[in-house]
Image: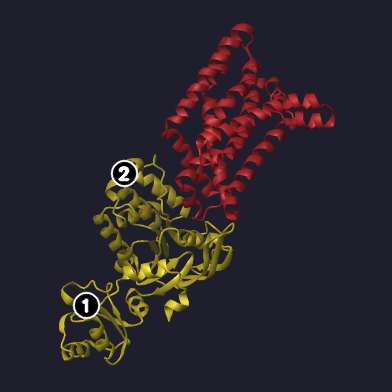
Amino acid sequence: MKNLWAVALRELRSYFLSPLAYVVIALFLALSGYLFALILANGRQASLQGLVQNVSVLYLFIVPAISMRLLAEEQRTGTIELLLTNPVQEWEIVTGKFLASVLLVIVMLGLTLLFPLFLFIFGSPDSGPIITGYLGILLQAAAFLSVGLWASSLTQNQIVAAIIAFALLLILWLSDNLGQFLGGTIGAIVSYTSVINHFQSFPQGVIQSNDVIYYVTLILAGIVLSTLSLQSRRYR
Amino acid sequence: MIRVEHLTKNYGPRVAVADVTFDVDKGEVLGFLGPNGAGKTTTMRILTGYLPPSGGRAEVAGFDVATQSLQARANIGYLPETVPLYPDMSVRSYLDFMGKIKGARDRRRQVDRAMEKARIAHRAGDQIGKLSKGLRQRVGLAQALLGDPPVLILDEPTSGLDPRQIIETRNLIKSLGGEHTVVLSTHILPEVAATCSRIVIISNGRVVAEDTPENLDRRLKGAESIAVTVRGPREQVKRALTGVPRVLSVEAEGSDGRPANGLASFTVQSEVGADIREALAKAVVNGGFGLMELRPAHLSLEEIFLQLTTTDAPAAEVAA
């Protein structure tokens, strides 16, 4: 646990020592602010529902940028060898890295709290759906980051890691179409893997267990696969 | 402190380390010598628990590196070949992080001490990415020294340094012996002669020799050799030299017909421990030839290294 935190804090610090964190956060804030303003001007509703449903699209681009260096860079510079020749285990490194990226996203989402603040100042929105909406996009970010983390464990090249992460997330998006095409039980299963079917109810104020299970499964899968990927050096 | 028994490592069909066996006692500085690609780094990675062995076993500080990896790792300070650093961190925060990972008690003091030992304390606040290669190497060394691990494993600690830094680093490593058990790899010979109390020479994944630098020198020669230069007809001189008692062989240097101004050079091998220089001189003078030069031919460590690592001499033959 102590090692996990040490890795997480070092990583988080490293995010803010490089321009990456600032660029990513600025980009996210600009795009989500634009969407927020546009949706608000069109719909004239004091709700975050429209924005929350669109954040998922932004994640497609933002998450690979955040996750790409997590393990790829350590493998390229050889610092992974340094960590793993000390009394540290693979899962501690992987989980620490994951935690750092989630903390970065929490900072990023924290800054968007300005949007609901505006709503509360100029209107009277229902706070329940806003809270569950935030929970939804946080869970989704964590799930996507975990996928990105695994992509980053597969290569020493950050760009390659980002592209793999983007492709995997895109598949998670598009698998719904395939599911609908296939139909039947198999189609339903394929559709279940699509993230499209799991972020709709949060901004409506509903937390469905099947959505939560979906995200938690993705998170655990990413962490386990990344750990195995780091351990695979032993069998090569 | 370190026991390596029949250690083997295969990468697929390629054998990187084959049946390597050696021991390192507490406080010893062991030089791990071999050409690039001989299996030095692989052996060190196995010792530090980064790679599992394919066969055989290794023990560090009493812990098996494969089955009690965490305990073994807790006793090792490791400096990999390419010094692994986080370039965006400052020297102090990097070492502080490594201290956390190593579970060092009284971290601040430990970090200060390691920086002191590695002579990097004056740059504690600098960003690692902006340091020169030599300084980075010191940061890496400070990292290995952090928490005073009983075993230090240093993979080519002087590569890429300038001559002055090399001497400084060697002195530092020398001073670490006694307190720490050190394994040091290098492909540079004077380095082991300068720093190590014992040498293991490895070639193509096999140990080809193991001894102190002095013993290695003596044992490998197996015979005393003397270089003789004589003015006189080559064949006759050779016959005269061969006639001297306790001479094992006489070899003429250079090809026939080449000796300039009637000079002929020979390398004379004698039995170990026999000083036949006087007898040789007498034989030359009695034969009516002119003795121009007579000196013990010293096979340098460099030549031994080349001999061992270029011919596929199995260890048994060399040790004979």
Task: Determine if residue B27 is in view.
Answer: no
Q: Which of the marked residues, 2 or 1, is nearer the chain's N terminus? A: 2
Residue under disc 2 on the same chain as residue under disc 1: yes
Q: Do labels 2 and 1 touch, CB within 8 Å? A: no
Q: Nearer the viewer, residue B255 or A99?
A: B255
The residue pinned by badge 1 equals: B264
Give the colour scheme shown: by chain
Query: Residue at coordinates 27% horizontally, 91% vertically from top-left?
Result: B243
Q: Residue A102: image x %, image y %?
A: 56, 34
Query: Residue at coordinates 31% horizontally, 64% vertically from top-left?
Result: B191
Q: Colour of chain A?
A: red
> Which amino acid does the dot numbered 2 rest on?
Leu
Disc assigned to residue A197:
none
Q: Residue B7: image x %, image y %?
A: 53, 67
> Which amino acid does the dot numbered 1 rest on?
Ala
Left or right placement of residue B237 versus residue A236 in this view? left
Left or right placement of residue A141 versus residue A8 in this view? right
Q: Nearer the viewer, residue B154 or A129?
A: B154
Look at the picture and state if B40 lies above or below A3: below
Q: Nearer the viewer, mark 2 or mark 1?
A: 1
Look at the picture and state if B58 lies above or below B281: above
The residue pinned by badge 2 equals: B131
Q: Quadrant of the C terminus of chain B?
A: bottom left
Q: Nearer the viewer, residue A85 or B166?
A: B166
Q: Quadrant of residue A96?
A: top right
Q: Nearer the viewer, residue B66 or B216?
A: B216
Task: Chain letter for mark 2, please.
Answer: B
Secondary structure at badge 2 equals: loop
Task: Determine if residue B315 is in view.
Answer: yes
Left or right placement of residue A226 versus residue B308 in this view? right
Q: Colour of chain B?
A: yellow
